[in-house]
Amino acid sequence: MQIKRLDQAPKDIIYYESWDGPGGDDLEHRMTTQHVEDVVQIFQTPLTGHYNWDYSSADGRIRKLYRLGKELNWNADFDVDWTQNFPKSEQPMDQNFNPFQGWEPFEKLSEEEKLRFGWHNLAWMLAQFMHGEQGALLVASQLASCAPTYDAKLYAASQTFDEARHVEVFTRYLQEKVGMMYPVNPNLKVLLDKILSDPRWDLKFIGMQIIIEGLALAAFNTLKLTAKDPLLKDIITLVIRDEARHVTFGVNYLEDFVSTLTQEEKEERAHFAFEACVVMRERLIATEVFTEFGWEPEQAREQVLASQIMAQFRNLLFTRIVPNLKRIGLLTDSVRPRFEELGILQFENLVDDGEIDWAELSRPLYNEAS
């Protein structure tokens, strides 16, 4: 099963009135009526829903995760200190992790332009998180209908609210603190389209709970270490708590189900998971930012791929996905060589999310976030 990669021209960046960074005086709000069709898009899905009239709990693990979700709820309006303001005159990310250091087109930029690049790069990254969270919101709402068991429906409903909160908090940070927003990356969009429009509920689980959420969890942990804004670190800490439950839910629920599939059905899902990983690796390359700064996108992409720091970063993002695929039975013999070619099979024996660390997931919410 191959997921087609899309190479579309990026739509315009949206600038908000709060953008006062370098070069901000002459920036115009680029959102016009001609772009309305790019803001609201329709997708069709042959979704098959399931009633479940048995209200007893069939799986204590899933019910306990659902209860934790209720207990550890947070409110972006009250539990985040929005009065914190990080100066636009400073780089928002640790520049030791900038893959363009020493690259001629980047070094030719003035210090002001390098600073502007730093903020655009952060805006692009956070926008992709935000778009991915909207995709997760839509998928979780589908799972509430099509997941076959009562416990899964309850958890999917609670996850839907989590994802809505994530979209809200990233949107607010981008609008109020960064001041601009990038469109959805075409590679992320094509994977979301596939997951949302596929009629099989378990493929939605695999694509969202294992691949997209697993990669996001690793990316959030990395961003928490490299971001300089204390407010952003607080937001990421809160989001990570939710995402850890979501990935754990997906692994535990899918492990039992995948074991009931035929070998042919397992192989189809294993190859889908691999193709999803390939697409998500491309999602990590900020082509739209390269275009904004007048760089040749393919040359900039090659620089990213050649950067040792970025290569390590991109691979480390799969430290949760590969062990989890092995745990649920989708790291089959036919796909193992393909994961090896990506350089990420090395992670297969790391700790997976099947064994639930209840003490970690149950930690009081405000110990870190306050």
Image (tube, grey):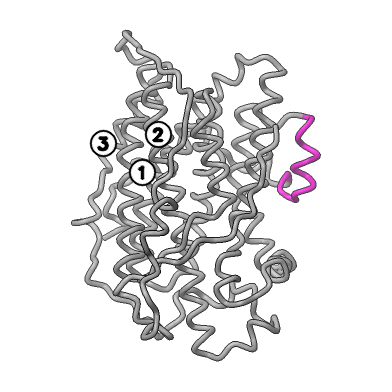
How far is mark 1 from mark 2, CA to CA?
Answer: 8 Å
Is the residue marked by circle 1 packed among few (<14), some (14-19), or many (20+) residues within 10 Å? Answer: many
Q: Main secondary structure of the magenta part?
A: helix
Label 2 secondary element: helix
Residue 339: x and y in percent read 74, 42
Q: Position of residue 130 (x, y in %)?
A: 41, 54
* Image: magenta residue range: 333-345
Tell me which corner region of the image, top left, top right, bottom left or bottom right, holds residue 228: bottom left
SS category of the residue bearing label 1: helix
Q: Is residue 271 above or below residue 307?
A: above
The C terminus is located in which quarter?
Answer: bottom left
Q: Secondary structure at mark 3?
A: helix
Residues at marks 1 and 3, CA–CA distance in whole angstroms: 14 Å
Q: Nearer the viewer, residue 2 or 40?
A: 40
- Mark identifier at residue 70: 3
- Binning the other alpha carbons within 10 Å of mark 2 as few (below 14), some (14 to 19) or many (20 upward) gives many
Residue lying at 60% horizontally and 14% vertically, measured from the top left: 260
Task: Name the residue carrying label 2.
Answer: 140
| 259 vs 325: above or below | above
Q: Are marks 2 and 3 in contact (CB under 8 Å)?
A: no
Of the pair 126 and 329, the residue shown nearer to us: 126
Circles 1 and 2 in contact, beta carbons < 8 Å = yes
The residue indicated by pointer 1 is 163
User: Which residue is outermost to the left?
Assistant: 78
Residue type beneath disc 1: Glu
The residue mark sitting in front, 2 or 3, is 2
* Viewer-nearest of discs 1 and 3: 1
Q: Is residue 3 left or right of residue 157?
A: right
Structural crowding at the residue carrying mark 3, measured as other residues with C-alpha within 10 Å and reported as few (<14), some (14–19) or many (≥20): some
Residue 299 x, y percent position in the rendering: 72, 70
Count the labels in the image. 3
